[in-house]
Image (tube, grey):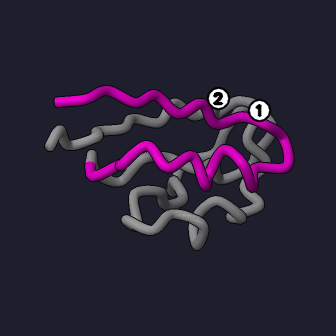
Amino acid sequence: MAKVKGAIVIDIQRCKGCEVCVPACPKDVIGMSTNVNNKGYHYAEPKHDDCIGCANCAIVCPDGVITVYRAKD
């Protein structure tokens, strides 16, 4: 059985730091950066590469700044 591997890309300049994506991730992949973007918001960023490509984060993101990619190993 092929293992599904995912990856997320977050548009950090458009992220408003609402943190809705953080609890939506079943693998605790997303955290908030200590840095700020051009608008002054702490943005979401991947903490590690355990993403399974479920896309929960992208679905709940109110600004649509998260793109999820999936690849089979």
Inspect the magenta stretch and tell me whether residue 64 lies in it. yes
Residue lying furthest front:
1
Q: Identify the image quadrant of the C terminus.
A: top left
Residue that badge 1 annotates: 14
Which residue sits at x=75%, y=50%?
61
Give the camera-side residue of 37 and 59.
59
Q: Identify the image quadrant of the N terminus.
A: top left
Q: In the figure, is residue 47 to the left or right of 10?
A: left
Residue lying furthest bottom:
23
SS label for mark 2:
loop
Which residue sits at x=60%, y=55%?
56
The disc labelled 1 sits on which kind of residue?
Arg
SS label for mark 1:
loop
Disc on res. 11 = 2
Q: Which residues are magenta?
A: 50-73
Disc on res. 29 = none
User: Residue 51: percent from the left, percent from the top?
Assistant: 35, 48
Q: In the figure, is residue 47 to the left or right of 18?
A: left
The image quadrant of residue 37 is top right
